[in-house]
Amino acid sequence: MLWAVLSGIALLIILGLGFYAGKLLFLLNQQKKRQEAARQSRIVNITDSVIVIAKAMDQQQCDLSEGVIRIVNLLNALPISSPPDFKAQYPHIHALFTEVSGFAILEERQQLPKSERRKQDIAREQIESEYESKVLEELPALQSYCGNLLAAQNG
């Protein structure tokens, strides 16, 4: 009789633990789905942004230096597994990024005297003119890459 009661209690404990483990697995699966949906959404937002910036650069609605800074930072933020070597794929965009990333921006720029700001503007414009044709040649390939990435996320 004691064995039957103990066996019943043990069975209830095992069933309870099994139910709890199943519930935890279900919640973990739901969390993974939410994280994957957020990752997919982030990829779509970033690639859309890169395409818009590249078009604006191509149509001369955005300074090349501002565009490459934004594009390089967005590409680095893409949450994809095994991303390509963007530096090798778009060498002129990265070269321009490297050259202009040392200039003052935002509040730091506002703190500079007018003469120093103008000096940086002239230097930046000169660097942009050196890279302009090469960067503009890379933009269609970048837009194509982002378009393909978008298609892969939507398909």
Image (cartoon, grey):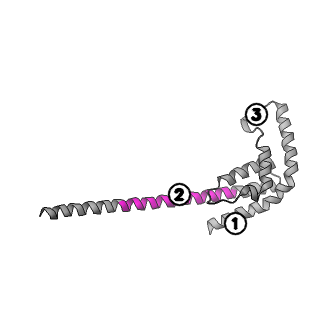
Above or below, comparing residue 59 to residue 123 in the picture = below
User: Which sits in the foreground, 38 or 130?
Assistant: 130
Which mark's residue is nearer the viewer, 3 or 2? 2
Q: Secondary structure at mark 3?
A: helix
Asked if marks 3 and 2 touch (Cβ < 8 Å), the reply is no
Identify the residue at image location x=73%, y=38%. 106
Asked if residue 79 lies left or right of residue 15, the reply is: right
Q: Amino acid at mark 2?
A: Gln
Looking at the image, tell me whether mark 2 or mark 1 is earlier in sequence order: 2
Q: Secondary structure at mark 1?
A: helix
Q: Amino acid at mark 1?
A: Asn
Specify whether residue 62 is in view.
Answer: no
Residue sitting at the far left? 1
For disc 3, the marked residue is 110
Looking at the image, tell me whether mark 3 or mark 2 is earlier in sequence order: 2
Task: Specify start and end residues of the magenta stretch as a single range.
Answer: 21-48
For disc 2, the marked residue is 35
For disc 1, the marked residue is 148
